[in-house]
Image (tube, grey):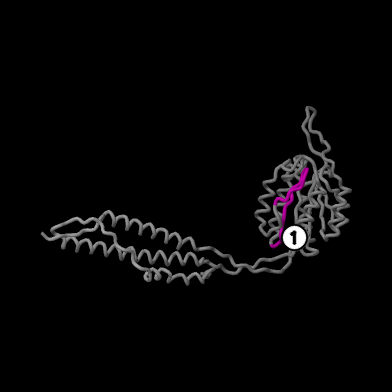
């Protein structure tokens, strides 16, 4: 680790206080005098104490100025070089949070989970494994919303996915709008590096864009779409006559397959968390992490340390001046009797 200065040219300001020596002195006012017959002894005592206080204040002022200039130059602690692998892939996740995603027909270790909880669990692990990828997050219901733009910050994307709630974007499903928003965010990315992973458990029931027309636009823009159909299609319901299986959802698999085919992607069916995990493992192989690297050196700002010390010295100077005025409130003048 090394210490560097972001603005070292500010050290040229160090001699500026010396300009005060070239300025004319202010004329002394003629304060009222207090006559003492023992003036000589009193004057010697006052001059001795005043001189020591003046030298102390001058020393503190010089130190405070040096610290202020040091803080202004922005000292920084530069860490060791960190190598970041970069995949060259820009992955956008579009997650359905419509009302049907609350159906509890997904299982993990024999425990029933809602569809959205299963997606959070498995997709969160997928996000953590995409080190070096740029990830974004879209949540959609009645409308599609960009929750996280493309970023290397996997922790933030993971946190925003965990905070997603059923019905936050409405109860219906706007698949076409989600694809359109993803295309808009991926359009500026390099060709062949634009990937959308769309997870839904229903059919397109809302929005202004037809999903197949959105897929055609995605194909023209070079965006590959991997679609994942969520849900087992049935859930267990307890009734007075025992546990019954009830059909859930209206997953439009034909449309999801067509979207994937038009964009040279693939369609997957996830009926439980185990299948969903296998899908993400397959996506890791389809969209591999490249061995390319970028270098980065962490920077920690240190300016607040000298700035805080200068502030403390300024307080000491002010207290010293106030104490001096109380000790010698006026000018003493004597006349010998």
Q: Position of residue 247 (x, y in %)?
A: 84, 38
Task: In this rendered view, identify the residue nearer to me: 322 or 302.
Answer: 322
Pointer 1 residue: 90
Q: Quadrant of the C terminus?
A: bottom left
Can residue 327 be seen here? The reply is no
| Extent of the magenta region | 132-147
Q: Residues within 10 Å of mark 1 (few under 14, many from 20)?
A: many
| Residue in the image at 77% along x and 42% along y | 98
| Residue in the image at 21% along x and 58% along y | 332
Task: In this rendered view, identify the residue nearer to me: 12 or 71.
Answer: 12
Inspect the magenta stretch and tell me whether residue 43 lies in it.
Answer: no
- Report which quarter residue 34 is drawn in: bottom left
| Residue in the image at 26% along x and 59% along y | 30
Q: Position of residue 170 (x, y in %)?
A: 75, 41
Does 166 appear above or below 15?
above
43 relative to 278 in the view: left or right: left
Inspect the magenta stretch and tell me whether residue 142 lies in it.
Answer: yes
Q: Is label 1 in a helix, a strand or a loop? A: strand
Q: Position of residue 306 (x, y in %)?
A: 45, 63
The furthest residue to the left: 337
Q: Position of residue 213 (x, y in %)?
A: 87, 52
């Amino acid at each position: 680790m090394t210490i560097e200065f972001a603005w070292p040219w500010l050290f040229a300001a160090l001699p500026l206080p010396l300009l005060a020596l070239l300025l004319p002195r202010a004329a002394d006012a003629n304060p009222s005098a207090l006559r003492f017959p023992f003036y000589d002894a009193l004057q010697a005592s006052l001059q001795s104490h005043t001189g020591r206080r003046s030298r102390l204040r001058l020393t503190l002022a010089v130190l405070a100025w040096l610290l202020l200039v040091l803080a202004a130059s922005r000292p920084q602690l530069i860490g060791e070089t960190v190598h970041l692998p970069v995949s060259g892939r820009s992955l956008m996740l579009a997650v359905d949070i419509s009302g049907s995603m609350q159906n509890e027909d997904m299982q993990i270790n024999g425990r029933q989970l809602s569809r959205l909880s299963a997606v959070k669990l498995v997709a969160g692990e997928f996000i953590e494994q995409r080190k070096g990828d740029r990830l974004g997050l879209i949540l959609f219901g009645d409308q599609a919303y960009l929750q996280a733009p493309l970023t290397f910050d996997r922790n933030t994307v993971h946190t925003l996915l965990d905070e997603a709630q059923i019905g936050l974007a409405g109860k219906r499903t706007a698949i076409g709008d989600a694809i359109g928003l993803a295309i808009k965010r991926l359009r500026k990315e390099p060709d062949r590096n634009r990937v959308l992973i769309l997870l839904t458990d229903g059919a397109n029931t809302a929005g202004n864009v037809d999903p197949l027309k959105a897929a055609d636009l995605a194909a023209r823009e070079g965006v590959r779409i991997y679609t994942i159909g969520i849900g087992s299609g049935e859930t267990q319901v307890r009734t007075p006559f025992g546990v019954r299986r009830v059909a859930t959802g209206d997953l439009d698999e034909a449309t999801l397959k067509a979207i994937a085919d038009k964009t040279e992607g693939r369609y997957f069916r996830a009926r439980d968390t185990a299948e969903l995990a296998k899908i993400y493992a397959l996506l890791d192989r389809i969209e591999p992490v490249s061995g390319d690297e970028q270098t980065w050196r962490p920077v920690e700002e240190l300016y607040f340390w000298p700035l805080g010390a200068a502030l403390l010295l300024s307080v000491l100077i002010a207290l010293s001046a106030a104490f001096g005025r109380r000790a010698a409130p006026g000018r003493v003048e004597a006349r010998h009797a």
